[in-house]
Image: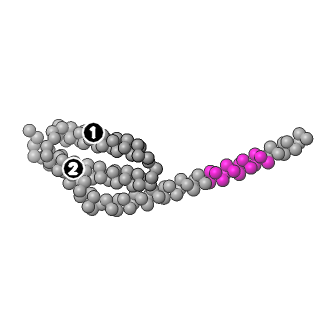
Amino acid sequence: MVSLEIQFKTFIYMLLFGHFLAFTFDFYRVFRSFGYLDNIATRIIDFIFCLLAGIITFIILLKSNLGEIRIYIFFSLGLGILIYNRLFSKYAITSFRVILEEIIKIIRKSFKLIKKLYKIIEGAFLKIKEKINSFKT
């Protein structure tokens, strides 16, 4: 039998882990909304997310209350997700979207810069090649 103190700590851990799960899922949801993942990749990542969530939940339970599964565990996980979704999800999604859009802009600008540098270097090599060929004739 697990003491009331351990049950309370486990409840708090699961509540916080519910927040964490919802937070990471919001990030994944925003990333997925940009359309870079196809249907198969989405299904695979969904499966991996659920698998990792289950494994981490079990590890937390093992460390906090020797792995005992009680109804309050599910209640606290659900409550943590619900509280996060009601209070923080909208702001987190907006923040993630802005951050990812900026990262994408930086990556696109970097690729454009690399492409321009490549063209400049390619042009310089072509001019050098032409000069070398003109010396041969």
Q: Which residue is mark 2?
A: 77
Asked whether residue 73 is in view, the answer is yes
Q: Position of residue 109 (x, y in %)?
A: 57, 56
Describe the element under mark 1 as helix, strand or loop. Answer: helix
Describe the element under mark 2 as helix, strand or loop. Answer: helix
Instruction: Work out whether mark 2 precedes mark 1 in sequence or the reverse, and give the earlier one.
Output: 1
Q: Could you tell whether 119 is left or right of 106 in the image? A: right
Q: Residue at x 8, y 38 (%)?
A: 1
Q: Position of residue 29 (x, y in %)?
A: 37, 53
Q: Residue at x 27, y 62 (%)?
A: 87
Quadrant for the C terminus in the image: top right
Q: Which residue is mark 1?
A: 55
Q: Could you tell whether 32 is left or right of 86 in the image? A: right
Magenta range is: 113-127
Image quadrant where residue 49 sits:
top left
Residue sticking out furthest to the right: 137
Residue 119 highlighted magenta (yes or no): yes
Q: Residue at x 72, y 47 (%)?
A: 122
Badge 1 amino acid: Ile
Q: Nearer the viewer, residue 39 or 3?
A: 39
Q: Could you tell whether 70 is left or right of 91 in the image? A: left
Label 2 Cα crowd, 10 Å radius (few <14 / some 14-19 / many 20+): many
Image quadrant where residue 6 sits:
top left
Numbered mark located on residue 12 in the image: none
